[in-house]
C-alpha cells in the first residue's frame, strides 16, 4: 500500500517510471547534484538500475514515486538512503517542473518524514543540498530542517560558486511541529 499524503501518494517504483526518471536526471535544473552530471542518461540505464534491485528484508534505502492524487500524474521521486536502524537517514527529492510551487513537493517530503519518524523510529533525518538551490533550502526549512554543516564555496554550479550545506531535523523537533502525532519513543533525559 502506498504512503498516503494529502495531495500525493508515494508508491513503489515501476518499470514505466524510468522514462521520467531519466528525463529528470537529464534536466540540469532537476538533477539536483552538487556537481553537474552530463545530461546523457538513457532510459535503458535507468531500467538496468531498476532491474538490479534485489528483494531484501534488511533494506537501508527506498525510492518512492510521487503521484499527485488529483491528476493521477507522476510528479517525481523522493527517497531515503543510508538508514542506520532507529538512528538516522538521508533524504532526497526531485519534482518535475510542472509541479513546482504546487505544494506537491512539501506534501511528499512530509509524507516521507512521517514514515521515517513514526514507522522507522529514526532520531535524525538530514539532507545534502547547496545554496544554488534556494527552493530546496526553502522546502527543507518549511519542514523544520536547519543548516548544521556549511562547506563554503564548495560547489560550482549554474556558472557560480555556492556553499554545500547539510540540513538536519531532529525527532523532537519533528514531533513538536506535529501535535497531531505522539512520540511513543521519546528521548530519555540524562
Ligand atoms: C526542490 C524542489 C523539490 C522544491 O519544490 P517546489 O515545488 O519547487 O518548492 P516550492 O515552490 O514549494 O518552494 C519551497 C520553498 O522555498 C521557497 N522558495 C522558493 N523559491 C525561492 C527562492 N528563489 N529563494 C528563497 N526561497 C524560495 C518557497 O517560498 C517555499 O517556501 P514556503 O512554502 O515556506 O513559502 C523542486 O524545486 C525541485 O525538484 N528542484 C530540483 C531538484 C532539487 O533541487 N532537489 C533538492 C535537492 S537537495
Image (cartoon, rainbow, N blue to C red):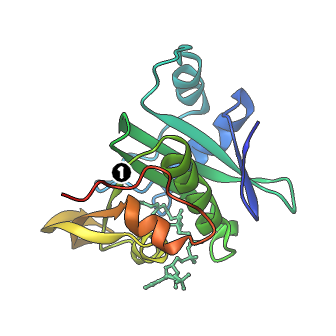
Q: Position of residue 187 (x, y in %)?
A: 33, 55
The residue depicted at 73 percent of the width and 41 percent of the height is: 2
* Residue 26 visible to the viewer: no
Q: Is residue 55 left or right of residue 71?
A: left
Q: Nearer the viewer, residue 144 or 171?
A: 171
Q: Nearer the viewer, residue 20 or 111?
A: 111
Q: Is residue 37 left or right of residue 99?
A: left
Q: Quadrant of the N terminus?
A: top right
Crowd band around label 1 with a 10 angstrom C-alpha radius: few (<14), some (14–19), many (20+)? many
Q: Is residue 117 left or right of residue 102?
A: left
Q: Position of residue 167 (x, y in %)?
A: 30, 64
Q: Quadrant of residue 107?
A: bottom right
The residue depicted at 40 percent of the width and 39 percent of the height is: 81
Placement of 108 over or under 136, stated as above or below: above
Placement of 170 over or under 123, stated as above or below: below
Q: Which residue is mark 1?
A: 123
Q: Position of residue 86 (x, y in %)?
A: 38, 39
The residue depicted at 45 percent of the width and 59 percent of the height is: 28
Residue at disc 1, CB closer than 8 Å to ligand 1: no
Q: Position of residue 135 (x, y in %)?
A: 46, 75
Q: Quadrant of the C terminus?
A: bottom left
Amino acid at each position: 500500500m502506498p504512503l498516503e499524503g494529502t495531495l500525493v501518494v508515494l508508491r513503489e517504483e515501476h518499470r514505466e517510471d524510468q522514462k521520467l526518471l531519466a528525463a529528470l536526471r537529464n534536466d540540469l535544473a532537476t538533477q539536483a547534484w552538487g556537481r553537474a552530471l552530463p545530461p546523457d542518461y538513457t532510459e535503458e540505464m535507468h531500467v538496468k538500475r531498476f532491474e538490479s534491485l534485489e528483494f531484501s528484508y534488511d533494506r537501508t534505502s527506498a525510492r518512492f514515486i510521487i503521484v499527485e492524487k488529483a491528476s493521477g500524474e507522476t510528479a517525481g521521486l523522493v527517497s531515503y538512503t543510508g538508514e542506520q536502524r532507529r538512528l538516522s537517514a538521508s533524504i532526497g527529492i526531485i519534482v518535475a517542473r510542472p509541479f513546482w510551487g504546487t505544494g506537491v513537493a512539501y506534501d511528499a517530503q512530509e509524507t516521507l518524514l512521517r514514515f521515517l519518524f513514526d514507522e522507522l523510529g529514526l532520531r535524525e533525518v538530514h539532507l545534502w543540498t547547496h545554496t544554488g538551490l534556494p527552493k530546496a533550502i526553502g522546502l527543507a526549512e518549511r519542514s523544520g530542517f536547519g543548516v548544521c554543516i556549511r562547506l563554503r564555496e564548495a560547489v560550482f554550479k549554474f556558472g557560480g560558486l555556492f556553499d554545500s550545506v547539510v540540513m538536519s531535523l531532529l525527532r523532537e523537533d519533528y514531533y513538536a511541529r506535529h501535535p497531531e502525532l505522539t512520540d511513543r519513543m521519546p528521548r530519555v533525559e540524562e
